[in-house]
């Protein structure tokens, strides 16, 4: 047996560890359910899965508060789930139902749940980066103490909007955490072929902010790195860049022809045994005596029941009426 890390050393720490596992399971089992729905012909489009990247999104989100802002990207299920969003309205959105978080109009790539600070996600690469930067500015102007957690991938790391945003955030010391989920591929383009540096975090130096590289399969390591960046942001010391090296277990979008030629399929299959963040954390919790096998199985069963209920809620929900196409187009603001 190994002594647990200080974060998990007492009862409160045990609860933190269980919450991390719960959220990773919520992401994984939610997305496994979407795979089943896809094969059943119930999903109207392909989906971009976070399977393999759960530790990165959960470790980062657990380091923030519910009131803090968060923006995601096209691989969008994991972000609001990791932030604590309810599963029913998210699943309903995937099925295009009226009870979805965006009224069934956004779908898989455009989830938003303002109740947990999730400002929205988009299929346009890098488009949420300035949104998070603006949210950080708003928090600074209001003096609310909030921070903005901004997720993007290695593909977006070369978008001009990231560099523009980091530049102004550094100048104004905005409370923003730029979080790169580097899974090694922008669709099918290997990161080494599209990035001029081995680590995206190196670029932080050009904007006078800390840049940290972390193992994206280790939820505790991600939590620690993001927690430090959050503390720095709340203290008024400005933005940080955190890069989590992670793995995308499935194709860029589930439903593409597989296997794709750019990856060795045998290597990809081995990841489920060697770098699966849930399996790794499961083993550590047992080794640290933070949880028993029975407790972890009960937790998985609880989450599976929650996911099953979300699927049934989505199935029972109505589609939006045709006239709803003309609502939510703009907002009227009184003078």
Image (cartoon, helix red, strand yellow):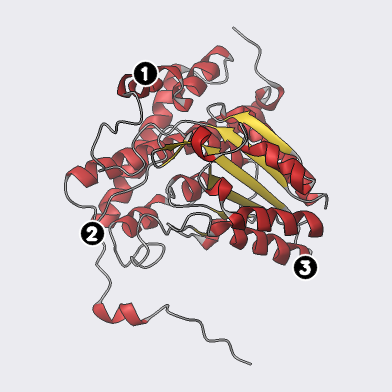
In this picture, is 106 found above or below 13?
below
Give the mark count. 3
Mark toward the start of the polypeptide (2 vs 1): 1
Mark toward the start of the polypeptide (3 vs 2): 3
Question: Observer-nearest residue: 5 or 239?
Answer: 239
Quarter of the image holding residue 256?
top left
Q: Position of residue 324 (x, y in %)?
A: 32, 78
Residue pointed to by mark 3:
141
Number of other residues with Cα within 10 Å of mark 1, as a class: few under 14, some 14 to 19, many 20 or more: few
In this rendering, which labeled residue sits more in front, label 1 or label 3? 1
Quadrant that contains the C terminus: bottom right
Q: Secondary structure at mark 3?
A: helix
Residue pointed to by mark 1:
270
Horizontal side, residue 170 vs residue 106: left or right: right
Residue at point 39%, 31% (across, down): 300
Residue at point 72%, 43% (across, down): 204
Q: CA distance from mark 2 to mark 1?
A: 38 Å
């Amino acid at each position: 047996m190994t002594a647990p890390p200080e974060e998990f050393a007492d009862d409160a720490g045990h609860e933190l560890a269980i919450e991390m596992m719960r959220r990773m399971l919520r992401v994984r089992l939610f997305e496994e359910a979407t795979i089943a729905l896809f094969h059943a012909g119930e999903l109207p489009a392909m989906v971009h899965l976070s399977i393999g990247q759960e530790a990165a999104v959960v470790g980062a989100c657990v380091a923030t508060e519910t009131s803090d802002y968060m923006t995601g990207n096209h691989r969008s299920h994991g972000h609001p789930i990791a932030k604590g969003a309810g599963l029913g309205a998210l699943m309903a959105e995937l099925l295009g139902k009226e009870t979805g978080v965006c009224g069934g109009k956004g779908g898989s790539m455009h989830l938003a749940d303002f109740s947990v600070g999730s400002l929205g996600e988009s299929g346009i690469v890098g488009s949420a980066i300035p949104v998070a930067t603006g949210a950080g500015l708003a928090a600074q102007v209001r003096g609310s103490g909030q921070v903005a957690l901004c997720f993007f991938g290695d593909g977006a790391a070369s978008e001009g909007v990231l560099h523009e945003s980091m530049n102004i955030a550094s100048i104004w010391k905005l409370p923003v955490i730029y979080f790169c989920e580097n899974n090694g591929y922008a669709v099918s383009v290997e990161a080494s072929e599209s990035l001029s540096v081995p680590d995206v975090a190196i670029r932080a130096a050009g904007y006078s902010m800390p840049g940290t590289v972390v193992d994206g399969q280790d939820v505790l390591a991600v939590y620690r790195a993001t927690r430090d960046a959050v503390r720095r942001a709340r203290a008024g010391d400005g933005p940080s860049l955190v890069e989590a090296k992670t793995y995308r277990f499935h194709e860029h979008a589930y439903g593409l022809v597989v296997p794709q030629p750019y990856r060795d399929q045998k290597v990809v299959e081995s990841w489920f045994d060697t770098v699966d963040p849930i399996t790794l954390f499961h083993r550590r919790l047992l080794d640290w005596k933070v949880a028993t096998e029975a407790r972890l199985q009960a937790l998985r069963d609880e989450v599976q029941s929650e996911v099953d209920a979300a699927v049934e809620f989505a199935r029972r929900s109505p589609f939006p009426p045709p006239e709803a196409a003309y609502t939510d187009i703009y907002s009227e603001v009184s003078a």
